[in-house]
Image: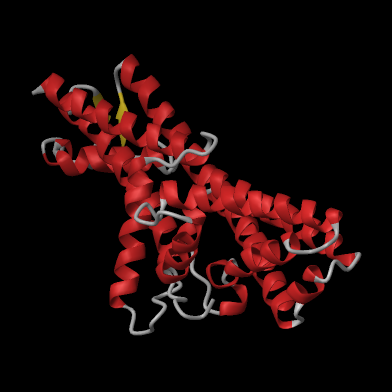
Amino acid sequence: MYWVFTILGVSLVTVALRDIFHTLWHPGGFGPLSHAAFVLTWRATRVLSRRPRGSELGGPLGLLLTLAVWTVMLVAGFALIYLPRMPDGFNYASSLDVPTSSGPLGAVYVSVVALTTLGLGDIQPASSTLRLLLPIEALLGFLLLTAGISWILQLYPALVRRRALARHLTTMRRCGTAEQVGSGDAAAVHHLEGLRSELAMVHVDLVQYEESYYFREASPDLALAAALPYVDTLASAGQRSSSPAVQHSARLLAGELSALLQRLRRHHLRRSEDEASTLAAFARDHGYEGQT
């Protein structure tokens, strides 16, 4: 059982670290564990919420659940490594009952104390291997803490940019910008180019932070799922314009929209087949069907 526990423990730690790497540092990556956590909370909040759009807590809860899964896997993995080495591999304080403190709970206690960098406590490593292993776990715990904080600090600005784009589109729709673009007004190029830049930034954010898809907005004015169809309206109006400059800007905007929708089809809305169905599926998935 010595090597069975060790192999299981190393496997758990490896899987957790791989998922952390793919979620936080791999460009465009999203680990399978974190993806499952976000999908679970996304679906659960939609089922449990009484409101038509579902709860806006799906994304934040997915983030917390992901961090909790990583923590539990690291604690359990190192505990499995320590367990077969107890009690011979550790020194115990005189106040402890060694047989009682050498079971699974004792191994979990040592792992939690090491991962949270609280110190060695009243159970300390005796062998040279364990004296190296516990500081490594402490470093991983510090890494997990700082990575979690950095993840939150980087994710929410991406959500702000997405909401700002939705608000911009909502304002343009209310002001009848599509009519101005279709007339070939000189300001139309400025509108279309600015919008294309914002849309490209949101696309990059979705690639870098795929988990941002699972954050809902309570207000349709801030929901990209509700506002995005107006980009297609603007691009179509611009391409019908008599101004070559406006037509060119409209084609660029349509291309940027097409790239974003292709990303959504590939990773989130795989049942949709074309751009129109993808726009409709995006709105429906976020609870804004019929409000686009």
Image quadrant in which you'd find residue 193: bottom right
Residue depicted at x 62% and y 78%: 221
Q: Percent x, y for residue 203?
A: 61, 50
Residue most extreme to the left:
1
Q: Percent x, y for residue 284?
A: 42, 71
| Left or right side of 242 for 4 | left
Residue depicted at x 69% and y 61%: 235
Q: Percent x, y for residue 237?
A: 71, 67
Q: Percent x, y for residue 129?
A: 32, 16
Residue most extreme to the right:
186
| Left or right side of 109 for 169 | right
| Left or right side of 74 for 179 | right
| Left or right side of 55 for 228 | right
Residue most extreme to the top:
128
Where 90 sits versus 192, above or below? above
Depth check: give the residue in front, 237 or 267: 237
Where 256 sits versus 2, above or below? below
Residue 217, visible in the rendered structure: yes
Quarter of the rendering occupied by the N terminus: top left
Depth check: give the residue in front, 168 or 196: 196
Depth check: give the residue in front, 225 or 103: 225
Residue 163, visible in the rendered structure: no
Q: What number of labels is visible?
A: 0
Residue depicted at x 49% and y 62%: 276
Quarter of the rendering occupied by the C terminus: bottom right
